[in-house]
Image: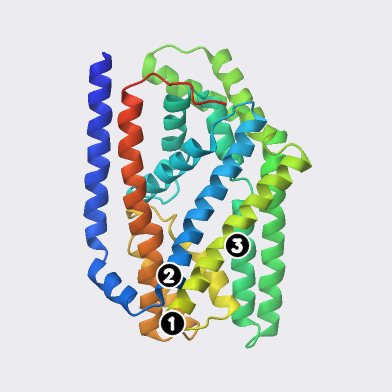
Amino acid sequence: MPRAMKSFLIVVAVVAFMAVAVRLLLQEDVSRLLATLRTSHRGLILLAVSTYFLSVLVWALRWRVALNSLCCRIRLRLLAAVVMVGIFLNNVTPVARMGGDPFGRVYLLQRLANAPYSAAMAASIGEHAYDPLFTVLLLTAGLYVHVRGTSSPLAALILLVGLLIAIAVGVGPRLFFKQKVGLTRLGHVLGAIAGWLSGRTDRQKIAHGVEAFYAGIYTTIDTWQRGLQIGAFTAAIWGMDVLRFYLIFIGLGYRPDIGTLLLASSLPVLVGLIPFLPGGLVIVEGSLVALFAARGVPLDVAVAVTIVERGISFVLSSIIGGVIFSYLGIKSAECNGPQEQK
């Protein structure tokens, strides 16, 4: 395909994504958001916004650790920008965490930094190895706090089941890729797909590629040092998520309990995976309001917190991520992978 045509298609894709983003943002009650912000403690709300973007920087640091383990060294500034693009794409595509992460940001990294696609993809998956663990831990702790005062046996059961699941999802990824579970089957599936698409396929080459992909993911967490680094960054990201909710609540004049904060940070992640609406739109908002109401938060405060939170994590992140995506998308169309590696 001629380079001019490739550039044109990339620009069209950028414009299309921006159009979808604008339409989605218009569905958010922006006027209500602005009215809510006018009655809130602006300093604390700005601190909550800063906490969100600080977590993006920590995410970029985590990704860099995974990339470095595969001898792929990328500047932190570029990684942070690409992470914002991934968040934007997640927000405008169904199944919240599957539109831009990892496919969109890996593609951009390959175009802009000449990073090997297989290494960038392996690092992007490997860096998420401990996200399910912290999701389960926060959700379990939140549910435990929610029911411990009403039913001790149920609280104990929740704690036991949650800890067992946490152990499974914490140890599972390392064992999965170390033991190469499903490697042969995946190779066969990819070989069949390649044969269907092209009419011919080199099954041995595909098998070697899948094996290298498994090895790349395992390499990102194969030592305790790297595992602890990625785990520490993951813990920091989730901690800042909890802190952001706390700052928003305090900024709106309400002091929440720890159970509310833990559930607010973990439950929307699971709800946002439902493949109906981009970025979990409407579903996430509804689940947050229902959760806060169930925890005894006054309805007006519950709605206000949800509006401000989604204003940060959906509206503001989409605007900034979309602007960065437009810039990086056009930049990638003008070059064939400039050397950003260092």
Instruction: State the quadrant of the C terminus.
Output: top right
Q: Quarter of the image holding residue 236? A: bottom right
Identified by mark 2, the residue type is Ile
Q: Secondary structure at mark 2?
A: helix
Residue occupied by mark 3: 239
Mark 3 and mark 1 residues within 8 Å of each other at the beta carbon: no
Q: Is residue 231 left or right of residue 37?
A: right
The residue at 42%/79% (across/down) is 252
Residue 84 place in picture, x, y as percent: 43, 45
Q: Disc 2 and disc 3: Cα gap in Å?
A: 17 Å
Q: Nearer the viewer, mark 2 or mark 3?
A: 2
Badge count: 3
Residue occupied by mark 1: 293
Residue 275 place in picture, x, y as percent: 38, 52
Q: How is the image coloured?
A: rainbow
Residue occupied by mark 2: 45
Residue at the outermost front position = 43
Identified by mark 3, the residue type is Gly
Q: Is residue 270 visible?
A: no
Q: Report crowding for label 1: few under 14, some 14 to 19, many 20 or more residues within 10 A (C-alpha).
A: some
Mark 2 and mark 3 residues within 8 Å of each other at the beta carbon: no
Q: Nearer the viewer, mark 1 or mark 2?
A: 2
Residue 263's tag is none
Q: Quarter of the image holding residue 303? A: bottom left
Give the mark, 1 or 2, whose residue is nearer the N terminus: 2
Q: Secondary structure at mark 3?
A: helix
Q: Is residue 339 left or right of residue 177?
A: left
Q: Disc 3 and disc 1: Cα gap in Å?
A: 23 Å
Q: Disc 1 and disc 2: Cα gap in Å?
A: 21 Å
